[in-house]
Image: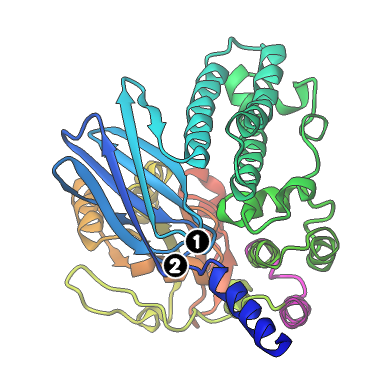
Amino acid sequence: MKRIILPLLALSVVCCTPQRQETQHITVTTNDTVGRKMMIVPMGNNEGTVEMTIENGVYSASIATSETGFYNLVSVNGQSQSIIPHYIPVTKSKSASHLTFGERSMLELEGSRDNRALAAYTQAYADYSRALWSLPKGDTDNAHAILESFIVKADSIIDEYRCTQPVEEYLKIWAYINAYDSYGSLPRIIGMKADEIPYTRTELLPEPHTVLDSPIAALFSNVPNIVYSALPNRNNLDSALIYVEQHYTDSILRKKVNDHIAARYVSRYNYNEGFDKGLERLQKATERYSLNPQHAADFAKHRATIPGQPFPDGIILQDREGNVVDFSAFRGKYVYIDLWASWCVPCLRELPALQQLEKSLKNKKVTFLSISIDGTEEAWKKKMDEKNMHGHQLWNPENTLGKALNVKGIPFFAIYDPDGNLYMHGAPRPSQGLGLVKLLEGLK
């Protein structure tokens, strides 16, 4: 008899265990459909936004199940947009909610306890943010009270709605991030310098690893930067990675943070000092911590930032007629490069000085080359016409030159020598006047 009962018991356990659903069907009704679009975005998946269809006043969509059960429900009506976190257990296949909209976007949501809790905190967050940005200058006391309210309110909502564990964790993490980010905005909000605020972020909030060590924290795009900013020795690659390994146990979050650390290492490294040692250090860290190999590849490309290195390979430069121009066409001259874009206001401010410099410079061994990193060819051409830009004007699609030269902001200026090798990375701007003129006139 036992030989019959035990297999049946095992079978019943398997049958009764909820299975993860591959897709979710989501329906939403609202009190206002006129001009309104609804979209759903799974958190943690690679899939993008799915626009919901509307029929007989009901929005609906079928979407791949989020790995964590969390989605962003997005409502757009004219210039008004609402984003509401939405939770559906991965073992469930359907979800239905009703949203009520008012003058300040969403006012109420009818649905599961979890989603009512998420909606309640969404509204509370909006209210606290408005209150914070309405404070008079120098009001640090009320600012402190509002910053504390994010976390207090999240705890209150968790108790009121008796949330499931994933939503409880999501709310705690979300409230922590809101308080963390809002503290960073205080100098602008209340018109004080950061060191004048009478309480620190660490006095206001616990250490990030006590709250954020969770795969749910990895759903928030700014969490890797929050973790990075709190590292005691973040400018040292090895020390930063060791600290994360010692203080964070969740593998998903740890991978995102480690890749963020590696990316910052690549962007901030002084490539003029110990290039080979820096690359070797990153390669060893990549192997030990399973970092994305692209970081080391990006580091290697930045060898081009070292004076004496040739113009980087694989850079496409295109003239106004669409012809590809090889940088070797400028051999025999010193080339003063201006990296700019039509949308860059500081770049446009440099134009008058640059054009005057090009006209007045007496050294015929120097030529000027402006390279646009505009997203579209049309924007580049339009701005050239507006500003009557002349001389050598080229377009670099996808900003590959800026990436190769580790450019952190534009306008950016560099000088290449007659052999096509880098002479100066980060040359003076035209508006700096006499210093640049003396430098260029002295090139022989």
Q: Quadrant of residue 332?
A: bottom left
Left or right: 316, with 149 as reference point: left
Residue visible at 51% across and 38% down?
113
The residue type indicated by label 1 comes to Val
Is residue 342 visible in the rendered image? The answer is no
Few, some or many residues within 10 Å of mark 1 (<14, 14–19, 20+) = some
Is residue 394 visible in the rendered image? The answer is yes
Q: Which residue is mark 2?
A: 21
Residue visible at 53% across and 82% down?
310
The spot of residue 36 in percent (x, y) is 21, 38
Point out the image quarter for the N terminus.
bottom right
Q: Residue 15 in magenta?
A: no
Q: Residue 284 in magenta?
A: yes
The residue type indicated by label 2 comes to Gln
Going from N to C along the chain, the mark reached first, 1 or 2, is: 2
Few, some or many residues within 10 Å of mark 2 (<14, 14–19, 20+) = some
Segment tinted magenta in the rendering: 267-289
In the displayed structure, 335 sits above or below 341; it is: below
Q: Which residue is mark 1?
A: 90
Left or right: 151, with 312 as reference point: right
